[in-house]
Amino acid sequence: MKVLNHNVVVLGAGWLGEAICQHAQLQGWQVEGTRTQLHHTHPWSRQFVLTEQGQVEHSVTLEHAYWICAIPPRARQVDSNYLNTLEQALSLAKKMSAKGFLLCSSTGVYDTADAEYDEQGALADKSTLRVSILRDAEERVLNSGGKIVRLAGLQGPNREPGRFVAGKALSSSANARVNMVHRDDVVAAITSIVAHWQEAADIYNICYPSHPTRKAFYQRHCKQLGNPEPTFASSATQERIIKAERITELGFEYRHAIY
């Protein structure tokens, strides 16, 4: 379904953000996607960078846009100024009369205990830096009137699970359940939220509804590539499951099996 006349600014046009930009263009939307260094690969490329003085240098021009923050997880480190960058983005979005702000977060905000976690699930405490940054970011966006998508582990083009675990000794259990989602499903889910912004909920989990064991998941992906299978530290059963059906209320369907 095409929804015309939306303006979209994607903050962090990397592996996920670039795919969002490309899909939004196919919808007939006006798009700008940012990186810290200005690239001219795409006509929609823009710069957004936090200087050492804490000021923003940017070339974003779209007003009355929906902002999607897709800054990659590796930036969520103490020396990345992720939270400061997010604050500046929220401020600029407000100045440019943004229609909404959507943060790509992680299902890593949920507790690690065995349980099923929907959008009201128990959150992990802020005892680790990663969780602290994730939760602080979510709180700032929600307090500003924005929305959150909590993404499970991502796979897709150039992120083939059978390649990056081939022959490795993993510290996890062979019988821990997998919570994964394909990038194309994430892009489609985000597009659905923007297209139905007014009726959309504040928080959505995005995770494929099948949860094979890690052993079955990685065995299949390694076999498809002809790579050696990984080994696991234990065989303990672990049933931490991310439930992500709420997003289907917007007409979205998961279309890309994870294995």
Image: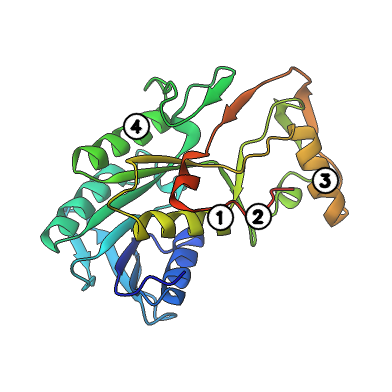
Q: CA distance from mark 3 to mark 1?
A: 20 Å
Give the number of the disc on residue 220.
3
Write down the residue under mark 2. 256
Give the number of the disc on residue 135.
4
Mark 3 or mark 1, whichever is nearer to me: 1
Q: Secondary structure at mark 2?
A: loop
Residue shown at the point (19%, 60%) measured from the top left: 98
Disc 4, disc 3: CB below 8 Å? no
Write down the residue under mark 1. 185
Q: Secondary structure at mark 1?
A: helix
Disc 2, disc 4: CB below 8 Å? no
**Image position, residue 26 (x, y; %):** 46, 76
87 left or right of 164? left
Circle 3 residues within 10 Å: few <14, some 14–19, many ≥20: some
Circle 2 residues within 10 Å: few <14, some 14–19, many ≥20: some
Circle 1 residues within 10 Å: few <14, some 14–19, many ≥20: many
201 left or right of 155? left
Tag 1: residue type? Asp
Disc 4, disc 1: CB below 8 Å? no
Q: Secondary structure at mark 3?
A: helix
Residue shown at the point (31%, 72%) measured from the top left: 46
